[in-house]
Structures are given as C-alpha cells and as structure tokens.
Image: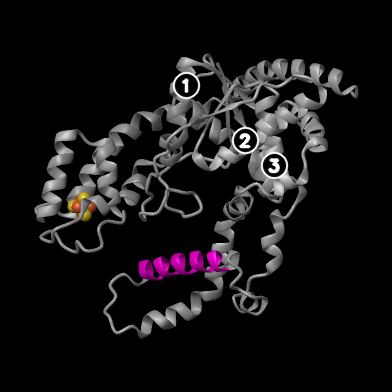
Amino acid sequence: MRVLSGMRPTGKLHLGHYFGVIKNWVRLQEEHETLYMIADWHALTTGYKKVDEIPQNVEEMLIDWLTLGIDPKKSVIFQQSKIKEHAELFLIFSMITPKSWLEWNPTYKDTKYNLLKIADLSLMFKGGIRDNLKTFIAKLPYKIEDFESLEEMLLDNVSDALIQALFEGYLDKEMLKELNVSKRDFYDTDTYGFLGYPVLQAVDILIYKAQAVPVGEDQLPHIELAREIARRFNNLYGETFPEPQAMLTETPRLPGTDGRKMSKSYNNAIYFADTKEELQRKVMGFFTDPQKLRKGDPGRPELCPVFFYHKIFTTWEKVEEIEEDCKRGKLGCVDCKREMLKNLELFLEPLREKRQEYAKDRALLRDIIKEGSEKAKSIASKTMEEVREKIRVG
Ligand code: SF4
C-alpha cells in the first residue's frame, strides 16, 4: 500500500513530534511504500512574511527525521516545492472545488485559530499587559519567592485567555487598542491560499495516488475533502484518482515543561537539538503536582507531567515504586526529576550524537532531498500526463 504523509518545516523537532508522528512513520516504512513530504509550500500559508527562515527550517527538520529513523532507503523523502506538478494540479483542483466545501470545512475556523501566529499574538498581548501585571503582583499580600516565574506564568495564561476571547468575539477594537495590538495582525492569514490549503493537501495526496494517509482525528475532514475532490474529478473526467483512506493514528498528548501540550508556541518543548545543559535546565524546571510543596507531602502522580515521562522512559518496576513513594510523600520532586532526567538522557544522548553527525553533512542532506524529489517527481509527472489528457488542457 502506498502511504503519504508530510510536515510543514517549522524548524527543529521536539519530543511531541516524535511520539505524535515520527515514531509511527518509522513503523510504517517497514510495512508499506512510504512517501514523506517536506511541505515547504504549506509553510507559506502562514509564514509568507518570514521566508528567510524556510531553507534553514527545511534542513533542521530533515536532520531530525533522519536522526529519528526515517530512512531514505526505505522511504521517499521529498520537498514539495521541487515538484512543480503540485502547483499545476492545485490550479486544476481549484477550478473544480466548490468554495463552500472549504468555507464549511469544520476545521477551518479552528485551524485558522491554531495557525495564526499564536506565539506572536501572545507576545503582543504580553507587551500590553506587562506593566499592569507587575503592579498587580506587587500588591498581592503574599511573599512571592520567584516573582519572575509567577509573572511569566500569569502573562502566559492571561495572553492565552485573551487570544481565546478574541476568537470568541469578546474583544472589541477599543480593547485591542488599549492592549497595543493592531487588528490587522490577525488578518495575515485571511488569504486565498489559507482558505485553499486543504485543496493543496488533496493535491499532495492524490498526485501520488496514495491509498492511505496517517492522520490524527483533527485531520479527518481534510482527508474527506481529498476524497470528495477525487470523486468530483473522476465523475467529471473519468476514473483517475483512488480515494485515499485515513489511517487513524492515536497521537498521545505529550506534556511540555509547563504541563500543557508540548508546542513550540508555548515555549515548553524539549528538542532533539537541545544540549545536555538545556535538557537539565528544562527537566529541573518541570511543572509538578502543585499540591506537593515539599518532600513529605503526598503527591498525585496521575496529574504530574514528570510522572507521565517516567511512564515512557523509566523501567516498569521503578515506575511503580515512584508512584507509590510519591503518593506516600516518601519521594521529593527534585529527586524524582533527577531520575527522570537520567532516563530521558539515556534516550536522547545517542540521538544527539547522531543529529550532530547529520548536521555536519549538508551535502548528504542535499543529496537525500534531490534523490527523493526525483523519485516523487517521476510519479507526479505520470499522474499529470494522465490529468492533462483527461481535461484536454496543458
Ligand atoms: S514526586 Fe515525582 S511524580 Fe510526584 S509530584 Fe513530584 S515530580 Fe511528580
């Protein structure tokens, strides 16, 4: 079975990417014909103002793919923009895709919300509220040990709440002005390309006649749209595209250092490119059960992200011991984090070394992309010959 998947090049990968996507890709390449796409045209959907970052991000992401086990001998690794046939089929599909399919796509609003530059928005909101927050915290009748981390925590939560409020329609022009945020910034993604990006996704799949696409539940409407476009094309011009199936994959929600979902935008991620020192700083700063203030306090491991990591990286017997000792107050969070750090480091250290090797060999990276893109192009151009013949244009 031919399986296709891709990722927008947003830079270095973190643990969440590995457990959510790459681990599954590595398994699939053992069982199927796999094509993995570096979706650099998709990076323009929201990043068209920051194009300087894209080439570097492509390389960093490829380095991580290789480090984590995507094997160019087993999978076709290619760069979307190297295969211009994607753009041609995108144009043709744009002609036959009813606008309402895109506007009513249930993920459109959510995706718009997610893909907007949340990190940038968050920073803008932070800028607007920072001064007042300092005064507010200073007035609190508590002795605050770590003023800065409390401030950061509040700033994060408040700016997240503001972003939510904005999208729910609760922030008017005046409030935005007070927060020093221009509404124009939110419309950077109000573009034709953004509305049409599921059409480009359909192209990515159909141009290779992929039979299956590994996706999380949130991506199901996009696969459905690809199937609808395939059906419409086939009805209009004759059987050409197979309808791709979604390979629903469970994506575990790996917590970041602050307990929220690991994400670059939240600044809570552990990267494969992190140095040993960076890893140590991040792990020792991990959020834990807030009710466990000192060693003797009983903890709730089921609510603690550190324990979540133990369940992945620590031996089963030791996990049971940690769970029990945490609940009984026999184990302190500092020791618990040290143990987690040790085990996580065992997993990350060899990968860090492997990553450095790939990072040194830029010529190899270029060759891998070139070779993979040539293979992908040969499939795509064959499909396009068939399409041109069917539509009598081109
Ligand atoms: S002892 Fe470990 S599992 Fe328990 S709250 Fe602290 S860090 Fe979390």
- At x 18%, y 40%, the residue is 319
Q: Is residue 161 magenta?
A: yes
Q: Is residue 348 magenta?
A: no
Where is residue 169 shown, x and y percent of the image? 61, 69
- Are the residues at dot 1 and dot 2 in contact (C-beta closer than 8 Å)? no
| Mark toward the start of the polypeptide (3 vs 2) | 3
The residue that label 3 is drawn on is 197
Quarter of the figure with residue 78: top right
Instruction: Report, in whole angstroms, how far the alpha carbon at label 3 lies from the one at label 2.
Output: 14 Å
Residue 224 — which label? 2
| Mark toward the start of the polypeptide (3 vs 1) | 1
Vertical comparison of 140 with 95: above or below? below
Mark yes or no: residue 339 visible.
Answer: yes
Query: What main secondary structure does the magenta stretch of the protein show?
Result: helix
- At x 76%, y 24%, the residue is 234
Magenta range is 148-165
Residue placed furthest toward the front:
235
Identity of the amino acid at label 2? Glu
Where is residue 354 shown, x and y percent of the image? 42, 27
Mark yes or no: residue 334 visible.
Answer: no
Tell me the SS state at disc 1: helix
The residue that label 1 is drawn on is 28
Which one is closest to the eye, mark 3 or mark 2?
2
| Mark toward the start of the polypeptide (1 vs 2) | 1
